[in-house]
Image (cartoon, rainbow, N blue to C red):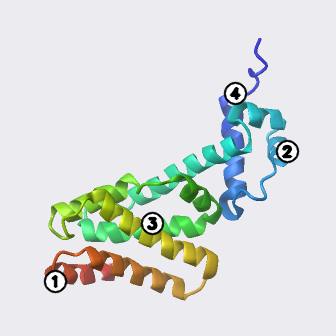
Amino acid sequence: MSRNVAYDDALRRGILTEASERMRDAGPEGLSLRSLATSQGTSTTAVYTMFGGKNGLLAAVGADADSELAAAQRQVLGGRGPLEDLRMLARAYRLWAVSNPGLYDLVIRERHTPHDALLEVVDALVDEGIFRNAPIVDVASSVWASLHGIVALEIAAWPGAPSSETYFEMQVTAVMRSWLLDASAADRLSDSRAG
């Protein structure tokens, strides 16, 4: 019988869930594999067998966190038009990131392209002639880079500051305005900001 039989999906999920909770705020630096394994009634051998060690565990936690962030963004989409969808998606991105700074750090280490929800909204904005005609990935990457920059500053430099949300909204408006096709779209942008 294989020595791995005791390491089942329930144990794997338990280790992942506990690791995620421990890293939600603090990130991976203080994560002790021994303490984590003990909390799940196992040894560090289980972590090495199932995940290949700490780096493999961090990658698995990061993948779960990335899915969680993507789901948080997707939940806010729909029915209001692409400008408002983009603003709502940006807000959901910020809320998830500042609520989970340690996990956000893991996501950003591994993610190199925008999430599908952002690509879809940008595609609609370009298709409807609201944003300038440019490659969708380029536009979405520009928006994402701007979101990440302002969110990373909030987490590192302005945690809990009342002005953080104001700065965020200003940045979202600025990046959206930079891609607008014409002045009539700018009026629609002002309307969407009020939402």
Q: Which residue is mark 4?
A: 8
Q: Nearer the viewer, residue 75 or 46?
A: 46
Label total for image:
4
Residue 11 picture quarter: top right
Q: Secondary structure at mark 4?
A: loop
Which callout, 3 or 2, points at the residue further toward the start of the chain? Answer: 2
Q: CA separation, marks 3 and 4?
A: 34 Å
Q: Which mark is residue 92?
A: 3
Q: Position of residue 22 (x, y in %)?
A: 73, 56
Helix, strand or loop at label 1? It is helix
**CA gap, disc 4 and disc 2:** 19 Å
> Residue tagged by mark 1?
183
Question: Which is nearer the N-term, disc 3 or disc 1?
Answer: 3
Q: Helix, strand or loop at disc 3?
A: helix
Q: CA distance from mark 2 to mark 1?
A: 59 Å
Q: Amino acid at mark 4?
A: Asp
Is residue 39 found left or right of 130 in the rendered image?
right
Q: Position of residue 142 (x, y in %)?
A: 37, 67
**Which of 13 and 144 lies nearest the eye of the viewer?**
144
- The local secondary structure at tag 2 comes to helix
Left or right: 137, with 100 as reference point: left
Residue 80 in sight here:
no
